[in-house]
Image: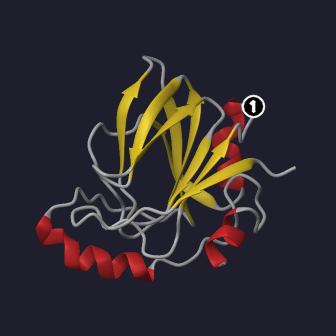
Amino acid sequence: MEPETQTYFLQDDGRIPNHPDFPLVVYQNALKDTGSAERIVNRHGWSNSWSGSVFPYHHYHSNAHEVLVAVRGEAVIQFGGEKGVAIPFKSGDAVVIPAGVGHKKQSASGDFTVIGAYPGGVQYDMKTGEPNERDEAVKQIKQVSLPSNDPITGKRAPLLEIWVK
């Protein structure tokens, strides 16, 4: 059974470009066994993984999509910049963040931990919405290719069915 998803299309706010075509995809209760989250996403082709928290400032990656899986605790993550959407995120939830979509931890429990990974193990860049990085970032975001698989299910669905519509 596929996990339940919600999608959020986030507009360019002048500082954070967000993605022109792909929505943010949130998976509620994506994984029951959060201890195997990193192995699961790695097996599905999303690698260069890490474990930690989410930065408490707006940032994005112009050259890579990213999956985050909450493995402990809970947080509120704001996506899309200052005018974006704040989403509660708890252990077992996952989110696929398209290239260019800003994200920032607003609040979190003391034990909040996520794992992050990137399709094909891309070495991601780090952008914070500075005016001098914008033109190049916007060009790069449009060139990031679709991942081969959904990081949670390992199939096309639901991610690629949402992004290819």
Instruction: Pick the residue in front: 119 or 14.
Output: 14
Percent position (x, y) of residue 114? 51, 36
Q: Residues within 10 Å of mark 1 (few under 14, many from 20)?
A: few
Q: Position of residue 108 (x, y in %)?
A: 42, 25
> Would residue 93 be found to the left or right of residue 64 on screen?
right
Residue found at the very far top of the displayed protein: 110
Residue behind mark 1: 33
Query: Residue 163: x and y, percent?
Result: 62, 72
| Residue lying at 43% horizontally and 82% vertically, measured from the top left | 143
Residue lying at 34% horizontally and 57% vertically, measured from the top left: 60
Q: Secondary structure at mark 1?
A: loop
Name the residue at the left extreme.
132
Instruction: Kindly identify the amino acid type of the residue bearing the numbered disc 1.
Output: Asp
**Can you name the residue that lies furthest to the right here?**
1
Name the side, left or right, on which 75 lies relative to 45. Answer: left
How far across and down, in percent of the image, does residue 159 sit? 67, 64
Q: Residue at x 69, y 61 (%)?
A: 150
